[in-house]
Image (cartoon, rainbow, N blue to C red):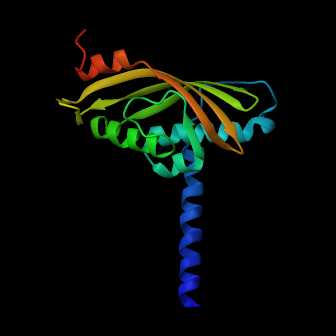
Amino acid sequence: MKALTLALGFGLAFSTAFAGAAENLPQPARVWADRPAGSVAAVKLAALRYAAFWNSGDPRYAELALDPDFIDRTLPAGRQQGVAGPLQASRQFRAAVPDLKVDVTDMVLAGDRVALRLHFQGHFSGRFGDVQGQGQPVEFQAFDLYRVKNGRIAENWHLEDNLTLMRQLGVVKP
């Protein structure tokens, strides 16, 4: 009984601590919605949790944001489909840019869809392929479109300004 009480107490403390992290969700600079705020709350929360994942690298945000059957409709070569894909991509990119931060510049909510314009920035101090960073700043934009089902992102279409990023990393010459 003591072990059960301890386990329940730990679980409650963990979930409460992480629930408190919800206050750390990135807040969009601008939001447009086709319905009142209350009726788009679940769609908005899923998008903000996913942005928090990219902003922090904390996989718990991705697990809360993404449907277990998540599909990346613009899957880059070499990336695993499903929830594992973004988790892998974040780990790899954070190895190159450990201080990566993401701002949500624009958010458009329409039905079960949400479109985001994202602003990524950080410093390239790790490795990206064969290139070692020297702490140089990186900054690029991305556009994401999500379909949300039951409060989680079921599908994602995304485009990143990879040319700008690759130039800043020194992988592509200007």
Q: Position of residue 128 (x, y in %)?
A: 25, 32
**Position of the C terminus by quadrant:** top left
Asked whether, in this view, residue 1 is left or right of residue 39, the answer is left
115 and 80: which is toward the camera: 80
Q: Identify the residue shown where x is 38% and y is 20%.
A: 162
Q: Identify the residue shown where x is 50% and y is 29%.
A: 103
Q: Position of residue 53 (x, y in %)?
A: 49, 42
Number of numbered discs overlaid on the protein picture:
0
Q: Residue furthest top?
A: 174
Q: Residue furthest bottom?
A: 1
Q: Is residue 164 above or below residue 54?
A: above
**Position of the N terminus by quadrant:** bottom right
Q: Is residue 124 above or below residue 150?
A: above
Asked whether, in this view, residue 117 is left or right of residue 42, the answer is left
Image quarter of residue 152: top right
Image quarter of residue 7: bottom right
Q: Identify the residue shown where x is 69% and y is 44%.
A: 151
Q: Position of residue 88 (x, y in %)?
A: 39, 43
Q: Identify the residue shown where x is 51% and y is 52%.
A: 60
133 and 86: which is toward the camera: 86
Image quarter of residue 47: top right
